[in-house]
Image (cartoon, rainbow, N blue to C red):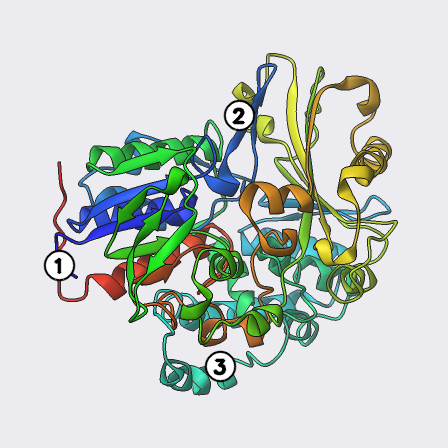
Amino acid sequence: MDRNARIVVIGAGLGGLATAIRLRAAGFGVTVFDRLDQPGGRARVFREGGFTFDAGPTVITAPFLIEELFALAGERLADHVRLVPVDPFYRIRFDDGMTFDYVGDEARMVAQIATLFPGDEDGYRRLLRQSERIYRVGFERLAHRPFGHWTDMARIVPDMVRLGSFRTVWDLVASHVRHARLRQILSFHPLLVGGNPFSTTSIYALIAYLERAHGVWYAMGGTGALVDALVGLFRRLGGRLELGVEVRAIDVDGSRRVRGVELPGGRQLPADLVVCNTDPIWTYRWLVPRRARRTWTDARLARVRPSMGLFVWYFGTRRRYPDVAHHTILLGPRYRGLLADIFERRVLADDFSLYLHRPTATDPAMAPPGHDAFYVLSPVPHLGSGTDWDDFAETYRARIAAYLERALLPGLGEAVVTSRLLTPRDFERDYLSHAGAAFGPEPRLSQSAYFRFHNASEDVRGLYFVGAGTHPGAGIPGVLSSAKVVESLLTRGRSRVAAA
């Protein structure tokens, strides 16, 4: 690419911002558009009554990927955002009240296993070593490599076979430990990126080692503070960000090459390259002309399996709950059956498992003095379930509130002072997410690496993808890694030039 190339990034989510920073630091002219009134995409922020709620991702791992972005401009992340470690990583609570603190220290994990699940200590150690081997290949060698050709996939097949990537995460865990509850504790990680442990390839077992090696962190001020820091960095590099502007179409010439984008009012903006931090299905279906789509036809797009949806309740309380951890996972009475309802049968079950985020455990400034801020997340089917969330959302919220009051937050009903909901229908409306899915395509083996949406479009030259929907996948490390992949595709052989 010529240094004078004009680049448009559609979407100011973490993937879009990271890509814009990398390309601007390489000397390209970059303009970012986002249809929302604030940056961050799924990582935007809700503020109400003195409470601050991170709308989306709250678990920060692989902080070195964020530090790299500031280093490109000769800056330090620590000068802009303070990351603090979270301990335990997660407190896992079973339906009968049993708890397990999931931590990064192997000795503490083994001690809990010896007490609660005797006989599985060595199995856990073997699983951890296997997770590290998978990480060395799946993350260190593959996460930042583009998969644009079948030969890219062919080269890694021997490693995938050797690591048993044809197995699911559940199968891998079950081959090492025998207690059913410990299997749940050690297999939930795919849910963090929209996958079913019973169908997600075991390459995602690398998450366990990624957390252990690099920690689980919280950005003081919330993930929104991290977004603000990235926006500031991009602007200091001379980048241009326009919010509240929706790109209506990607202009493609007769040779199927990008030549610009269409903005509101019919305004045409020339561009040599477009990077989409948007849902690939929605992008191909609504932004790319049908005449240009020879690979991603409507029929092929219809065959993509979306990930699960999410129901999220953000609420603040007039009292504090000091015994509640920063991250709590509340496992319901069913595990395999509930996940089958969500991913396979696509029916909204009467029971649920929940993720409860209490940032005020670490950062009291996220709420007024004497108050607590929370969000609770329930994995649910995507919109293919037919659930009318506009009608049913409040009923479902009340069910969750009643469960939390019984299990963990006594007096919750009278303590709530602010409340907000986000449903799969809102994911479709706000983020233009196909089927209201929260994480793009489901991360099955058949939708990973080469089989996922490519970072460089097969149909349109000059069109690229970053974010959860493309390689390597969802989660903050995944979307930041996708930015590295696109940078590598566009800056091979170029020296990085930071602009003042």
Label 3, label 1: how far apart the Cα atoms are: 37 Å
Q: Is residue 82 visible?
A: no
Q: Residues within 10 Å of mark 3 (few under 14, many from 20)?
A: some
> Identity of the amino acid at label 1?
Asp
Circles 3 and 1 in contact, beta carbons < 8 Å: no
Q: Where is residue 111 drawn, in percent x and y?
A: 65, 54
Q: Where is residue 219 drawn, in percent x and y?
A: 45, 34
Count of numbered circles on the image: 3
Element type at marker 1? loop
Q: Residues within 10 Å of mark 2 (few under 14, many from 20)?
A: some
> Identity of the amino acid at label 3?
Met
Q: What label does residue 160 carry, if any? A: 3
Circles 2 and 3 in contact, beta carbons < 8 Å: no
Element type at marker 2? loop
Q: Where is residue 222 drawn, in percent x and y?
A: 49, 31
Q: Is residue 329 visible?
A: yes
Q: Residues within 10 Å of mark 1 (few under 14, many from 20)?
A: few
Question: Which residue has dot 1 on it?
Answer: 2
> Identity of the amino acid at label 2?
Asp
- 462 relative position to 454: left or right: left
Which is nearer the N-term, disc 2 or disc 3? 3
User: Image height check: is 162 above or below 357?
Assistant: below
Q: What label does residue 468 carry, if any? A: none
Question: Residue shown at 28%/42% (left/top)?
Answer: 31
Question: Which residue has dot 2 on it?
Answer: 363
Residue furthest out toward the top: 369
Choose between 458 and 171: the one closer to the eye: 458
